[in-house]
Each structure stands twice: as C-alpha cells, then as structure tokens.
Amino acid sequence: MPPVARRGITSAPFLLTTAGTTALVFLCAFESLAVTTIMPIISADLDGRALYSLAFAATLAAAVVGMVTAGSSADRRGPTPALITAILLFTLGLIAAGTATSMPVFVGARLLQGLGSGGITVTLYVLVARVFPAELHPRIFGAFAAAWVVPSLVGPLAAGLVAELTSWHWVFLGVVVLVAVASAVIAPTLRALEPQELRPFDRSAIGRVVRAVVVAAAVVVLSTSAEIAPEAAGVVAAVAIAVVILAVRALLPVGTLRARGVLPSTMLLRALVAAAFFGTEVYLPLLLSERYGLPPWLSGVALTAGAVSWALGSQLQGRPGTRLSHGGAMRLGTGLLLAGILVVLLTVVLALSPIVAGVGWFLAGGGMGAMFPRMGTLTLGLSAPGREGFNSSALQIADSTGGSVSLALTGLLAAAVTGLLGSGAAVFTSTFAYGALIAVAAVALALRLSGLLRLEGREEPAARDRA
C-alpha cells in the first residue's frame, strides 16, 4: 500500500471528508463576502441604515463565542455534536436572514450565522486532527485556505447577479440547499468516527464562554467607535481595546501576548498578520476609486490579485515533496506581506500607476497563503489529545480579534487624519504606514518563531519526501 501522504487528500479514504469539509468552508466564506456586496440593497429594502455596521460587527462578534463554545464541546465530546450544532445554527441564520422583513430581525439572523460559522471553523480543525494523518495536514489546510479565497473571485459577482435577477433573499435561502448537500457528503465521516469517551465537565469552560461574550461585545463597540463623536471615539476605543486584551488572554494559550514558546508565538503571529493584511486591504479599493478614479469592478481587481496569489501560495506550500520548512514558510510569508504593503504605500507616496498597487497586493496575498495553512498544521501538531478544540478555537480567535481590532484602529486613524488634514493622500499614507509597521512586527516575530522551531526540532518540511 502506498504511503498515506502519497495517496493525498482526494484519494478514496479521504475524498468525501475533503469534499464535505472544504464545501462547508467555501459556503461560510461565500456568505461572508456575499453580504458585503448586497448589504446596500438589504439596508435600503429594510430601512436599516442605522444598523448597517452592526450587521457586520454582530457576525464577527458572535463568531468568537461560537469558536470558544464549539472548541470546548469538541474537546469534551468529540467534533461530531459540536459540528452538527454549528451547521444547524448557521442554517437557521440563513433561513432567518432570507425571510427577514426588518433590519433588527436581519441582524439577529447574522448573529446566528456568526455563531454557526465560528463553530464550523473550529470543529473542522478538530475533525482534521481525528481523520487526516499529520503528513496531510498542510494540504487539507491549503484546501481550506483556497476555499476561503475562491469565493472572493466569484462570490460578489454571483451575489450581485442573484440579487438583481431575483431577490437578495435568495442569496441566503439558496445557500441552505448547498449546506444540506455538504452536510450529507460529510455525514459518513462523522458516523465512522470512533465514539470519544466523555471527558469530565470542565467548569473553566463556562468562564471561557463568558470571556468570549465580553470580547464579542468589546469588538462590537470597537467596530462602531469611529461613528461616534470624535472627541469620545478615542476614549471608547481605548477602553474597548483594554477590555479585549484582558478578556482574550484566557481564550489563548498561556504566554501568547508575550510570545513564550512555539504555540503562543504562532497564535500571536496569526493576530499580527491578520491585523496587517486586513487593516490594509479595506482601504485599497478606496484608494483606487478616489485617487485614480477607477470604477468599483476595476478597483476590485487588486483584491482579486491578492485572492489568486493567496490560493496559489496555499497550494504551493503543501505540494508533495516541498522542502519549505514551517519556519521558512513564516519567514517567507511575513516578508512577502511586508513587501506587498510597502509597495502599496509607495504607490501612494510616489503617485505610481495603480497597477503597481495590484502587484503589491499580489505579493501580500501570496505571503498569507504560505503562512496560514502552516499555522493550522503547527497548532494541531502541538496540541495534546483533548486540547485540539481549545487550540483551534484560539487560533481562529487570534485571527478574528487581530483583524477586527486593526480594522477599527485604521478607521479611527483615517477619521483623525481626515479631521486634521482633510481627505486625500495623507489618509492612505497613514493607514498603509500603520499596516507596514504591524507587518514589521510580524517579520520580527516570525524570525523568533523560526528560531524556536529549530531549537525544538520542528523545522522539518510538512510533507518532505514521505509525500
């Protein structure tokens, strides 16, 4: 029989699991991106401009709660009950959103979607640990990364066409059928899992859920702080960030905020690269639209370039026979991320062609693609039995919290610069410079993490010649 790694994630033993899990990741990503496209239509139809930002923040915040709850459940009872519950919540959220007749109901539906999508993400990581051998982890996580990226290529266009040709309601209701199909595909895998012995109830899990709710509430406040009076926005944001830091510590491995050890450093690096990438990405289309006069569809080409390179990087890092070590992937990824953001920054400072910005974002996306799957691989590889759920949820929380805090800070920074200097190049220069500074910190941490991996003998390539 050939080695497991040589058979790959699409070989007979793993085909249904790969198809079902990747489809669920794809659908969660599609729904997230689709809402961004059709939200102006929904807001106008439901007269919900006042709750526009909350419709996004609620999902992000609820996802944190879903991650923690699902992670605790998966560690205690195995991934099956948590995954089924998460899929049901996500489906109920889709149905509620698709039938909503008022904005408050729609926001409530988005809360359910967030709980479900957060739970799905974490339990799929635990399922990977139970089903796939370690040699295949980089490749299945590469498939997950691609499944997140591909919707950015087709999701906005598909959602816009559905909303225009039929109704925005079908963007949600149509996905319900696809979720049912994906669930049916993965069902045999869940039935085949050996029953896990029920572990004693961990009372600390209640405290983690409470802290997750606190983090979620603080993220919502932080996400909307740029919309309040400027004289109060800074104070509110500072308090919200302090609350996030205090509450999130218990949701992450000990020593994460100080990067003490390989696993804590991996978590912190995930937060930093998410902060740098997403804090920059949100202003890139605005730059191309305002400074260069490009239409929306053309402004999105730069984001598409980043999405394509992210998918490409994800696949290349996990290809059979790769000699790219875990530490090498982190160094390469953070280096490309920093280089890409600097290219975007120079595009503004030197008034270069918008094509240059697209090239920069292609570099940044490739860096993210090289890193993200390896972070998942390291997290599972360093997780003791029964801790896969906690650590997987921690990785996703680091990503979500880092990105959301950074988005809020760039919003506050842009508002402050606009108030002082007016709108113009200064706004983009300051926000992209902020992203570059975060990326510099990520490069420094990647170098430290690489050294720790060498000391602990974990620098080997993911699939080396065994693949």
Image (cartoon, rainbow, N blue to C red):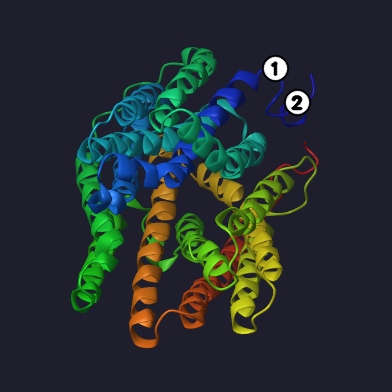
Q: How many labels does the image show?
A: 2
Give the vertical position of 255 relative to 434 (above or below): above
Residue at x 50%, y 57% (from the top left corner): 266
Residue 110 appears at what percent x and percent y?
Answer: 31, 38
Q: How crowded is mark 1: few (under 14 residues within 10 Å), some or many (20 or more)?
A: few
Label whose residue precedes the other's in the sequence (2 or 1): 2
Asked whether 361 or 80 is in front, the reply is 361
Give the residue number, with chain letter if any, for mark 1: 12
Q: Quick one: quadrant of the C terminus?
A: top right
Asked whether 283 or 168 is in front, the reply is 168
Asked whether 103 or 339 is in front, the reply is 103
What distance separates the C-alpha of mark 2 from that of mark 1?
8 Å
At label 1, which amino acid type do we have?
Answer: Ala
Give the vertical position of 419 relative to 386 (above or below): below
Q: In this view, does 373 lie to the left or right of 192?
A: right
Instruction: Tell me where residue 338 sits by quadrant.
Output: bottom right
Q: Are marks 2 and 1 in contact (CB under 8 Å)?
A: yes
Q: Is residue 390 left or right of residue 442?
A: left
At label 2, which amino acid type do we have?
Answer: Arg
Instruction: Tell me where residue 336 sits by quadrant.
Output: bottom right
Residue 230 appears at what percent x and percent y?
Answer: 23, 76
Residue 466 appears at what percent x and percent y?
Answer: 77, 37
Secondary structure under tag 1 reads loop
Secondary structure under tag 2 reads helix
Q: Quick one: quadrant of the N terminus?
A: top right
> Which residue extends farthest bottom?
421
Residue at x 38%, y 50% (from the top left corner): 397
Residue at x 62%, y 38% (from the top left corner): 137
Residue 237 appears at what percent x and percent y?
Answer: 25, 69
Give the residue number, with chain letter if any, for mark 2: 7
